[in-house]
Structure formats: C-alpha cells, structure tokens
Image: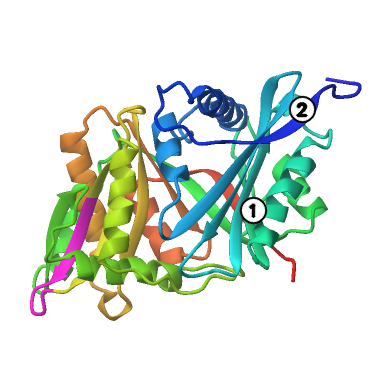
C-alpha cells in the first residue's frame, strides 16, 4: 500500500461471553486476522492459538488481567495490541504485544497501537514493559546467531526504534514425531540413573489432590530456576488455588494438558515435572511447555526421564500429532541439550525485549 491511510482508528475489544454468541463478531474477526499475521510470519498456522484458547487466555483471573485493542483501516481490522499485567507478583511489570498485517506496516499503525498499550501499563503503575518478537529460520526469515536475533527484522527494528532493549533470545524448536529412533537408548540411560530413587507419575489436566501442593512449589520455581537473561522477573507465588486456576483456563480453552512428574520415593515429594498441551483445533501439532527439575535433584536424568515419559504418552494417546513445538532460552544449555538428543531442531528464535519507563 502507498499513500495516506484513510479512516484509521483504534478500538478496545470487549470479550464475548462465548465464541458463538451475538457479541462475538469482533473477537472472531480479530482472531482470524491474528491467524493471518502468524501465517505471514511463519508460513503456517502451527504457532497460532485457536480462537477458543485465545478467548480463555484473555479472560481476567485473580492472578492476571489483560486489555486488548485492535486497529481498523476502512472498517477492516489490520492490527492488534495487548497489555497483560500480573496482579499478585511482578506488579512492577506489564507484558505487551503488538502486531500488524504486513501490508499496513511502516505507516505508524504499530506505533499508535504500542502507545495505546504502553499508556494502559503506565496507568496501572507498571515501570517495566516487556515484549517479544518472532524470527523464523529459512525461506520465511533469516537465521539468528545463537544468543541473539536479527536486528534488521521488522519486529526487532520496531522494538529498537521504540526504546526496547533485547534482554534474552529463546530458541524455537520442533520435533517430528516420526524421528524417534534414539529414544529407547535415552530411556534406558535415564531409568538407570533415576529408578533407584524416583518414580514417574502422570496425569491429564487435573493434578491429583495429594500432589497439588508439591506441583505448586515446582511451578513457582519456574520463575526463578530457569534463565531469564536481563528480564526483571520476580519470584511467583504459587499455591493449590493458582494451579487449579491454570487448569480451569486450560480446560476452558479446550486443550488437554499432559503432565509427567518425578516423585522422590523416600519423601513422596514431586521434584520434576513437564507439560505438553494438545488442542483438538490443531490436531497435528502439540506444544511442549514447562519442564523443571528442582535444583537439589538435578544430575539424576530426571529432565530426560519425564520428557520421554510424556512424549511416549503423546504417541499413544494422540497418534495424529505429527510435530511438537518448544521454546528454550539460549543460555539454558542443559535443557537445549536434552531437546537436541530427543530430536528437536531449531526453527526460529524469539527475542525478549524490555523497556523501563520510571
């Protein structure tokens, strides 16, 4: 497009009661445009959230609140911006996201959307703003050097222009589920290390009541025991209620959460866990999410043990899944090594950016 942009306006999204209700038209239109933006960046919709997952994830909880905005040109939605603010910890920070369809970039729309959500964050008293950019490898985008992202990419250039600094790079990797030839050897080695002292537990969606306090402790450690680069992140306080809230959000979005955990045989304590999310709206792809081993129990092969146990469940219970996606901080060498041994291959990088405003 060239020339001026007629009839550009920014609107706040009101979340509908459901995907199919009379008030859902704007949400469904925005969700379709967000799919189109993912398609433009990645050449597929594998990284796109389904509309149902988006709707569930955007609803306020006791732990996080969000506001979403969209830009229109000549009546058509062409961009999106969001501001998520934690409510019980990290109350100094806000997480922002801005994206615009390719044909409408470099015309001030992204900047206007960014200013809108920055003002929302500042009005909530947030002094640290955090955001991310996405950088594919291959024909759709240039490769990034380990530890960084290409600064000439549109997302990175936009962040730098608006005063954000790159604080961490995450590797986006994918695993083809038909390339599992080395798993048996890895399983034998992990069990040989772990079996005398640890047992593997597994569940879907709802953590057993006798384990939920232990799981909450592990989930709290995700904010402190995994690398965060230069991002200003404080420890999160997790308890059983917060775990149940996350499980409720997952169920509301229609996803299944497959969890594998390592239990210390002598204390009964959960000391490691991992999660894979499956969405029936995207049956061919799954997302490997959190994996954590408590520091006192590292060195026993537990990361490999729980990941393999969960991947085997995925094979058995969701045979239609062809690919698994995951993200790891570039400095998280140990977990990256586990993923490489499992067969994950780099597909892109995400940049994690930060700006201090007070």
Place of residue 204 in the rendered image (x, y in percent of width and height, measured from the top left):
19, 47
Q: Which numbered circle lies on residue 278?
A: none
Q: Is residue 219 visible?
A: yes
The span shown in magenta is 259-268
Identified at 91% across, 21% down, the residue is 3
- Vertical relation: 101 (above or below) 156: above
Q: Which percent across, then down, holds residue 198?
A: 13, 70
The numbered mark at residue 104 is: 2
Magenta span includes 262: yes
Work out whether 171 lies above or below 43.
Answer: below
Whether residue 271 is visible to the viewer of this picture, yes or no, is no
- Counting from the top left corner in percent of width and height, residue 322 is at 32, 30
Foreground of the two, 124 or 353:
124
Whichever of labels 2 and 1 marks the residue nearer the N terminus, that label is 2
**Closer-to-camera residue (204/187):** 204
Secondary structure category for the residue under label 2:
helix
Q: Main secondary structure of the magenta part?
A: strand
Secondary structure beneath label 1: loop
Residue 61, compared with residue 54, is above or below; it is: below
Q: Quadrant of residue 19?
A: top left
Q: Considering the image in quadrants, where does the N terminus appear? A: top right
Density class for disc 1 (Cα within 10 Å; few <14, some 14-19, many ≥20) is: few
- Type of colouring: rainbow
- Residue that mark 1 sits on: 145
């Amino acid at each position: 497009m060239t020339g001026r942009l007629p009839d550009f306006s920014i609107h706040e999204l009101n979340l509908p009661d459901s995907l199919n209700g009379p008030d859902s038209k704007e949400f469904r239109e925005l969700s379709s445009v967000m799919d189109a933006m993912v398609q433009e960046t990645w050449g597929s919709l594998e990284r796109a959230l389904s509309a149902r997952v988006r709707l569930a994830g955007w609803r306020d909880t006791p732990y996080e609140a969000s506001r979403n905005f969209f830009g229109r040109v000549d009546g058509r939605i062409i961009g999106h911006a969001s501001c998520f603010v934690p409510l019980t910890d990290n109350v100094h920070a806000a997480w922002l996201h801005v994206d615009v369809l390719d044909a409408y970039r470099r015309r001030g729309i992204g900047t206007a959307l960014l200013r809108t959500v920055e003002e929302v964050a500042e009005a909530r008293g947030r002094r640290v703003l955090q955001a991310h950019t996405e950088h594919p490898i291959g024909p759709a985008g240039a490769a990034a050097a380990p530890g960084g992202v290409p600064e000439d990419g549109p997302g990175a250039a936009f962040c730098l222009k608006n005063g954000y600094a790159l604080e961490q790079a995450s590797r986006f990797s994918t695993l083809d589920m038909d390339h599992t030839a080395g798993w048996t050897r890895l399983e034998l080695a992990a069990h040989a290390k772990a079996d005398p002292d640890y047992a593997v537990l597994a569940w879907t969606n709802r953590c057993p009541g006798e384990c939920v306090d232990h799981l909450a402790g592990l989930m709290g450690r995700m904010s402190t025991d995994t690398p965060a680069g230069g991002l200003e992140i404080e420890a999160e306080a997790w308890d059983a209620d917060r775990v149940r809230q996350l499980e409720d959000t997952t169920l509301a979005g229609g996803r299944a959460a497959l969890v594998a955990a390592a239990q210390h045989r002598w204390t009964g304590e959960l000391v490691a866990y991992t999660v894979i999310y499956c969405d029936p709206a995207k049956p061919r792809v799954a997302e490997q999410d959190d994996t954590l081993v408590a520091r006192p129990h590292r060195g026993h092969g537990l990361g490999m043990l729980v990941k393999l146990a969960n991947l085997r469940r995925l094979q058995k219970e969701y045979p239609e899944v062809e690919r698994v996606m995951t993200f790891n901080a570039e400095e998280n060498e140990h977990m990256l090594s586990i993923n490489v041994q499992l067969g994950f291959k780099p597909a892109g990088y995400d940049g994690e950016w930060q700006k201090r405003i007070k």
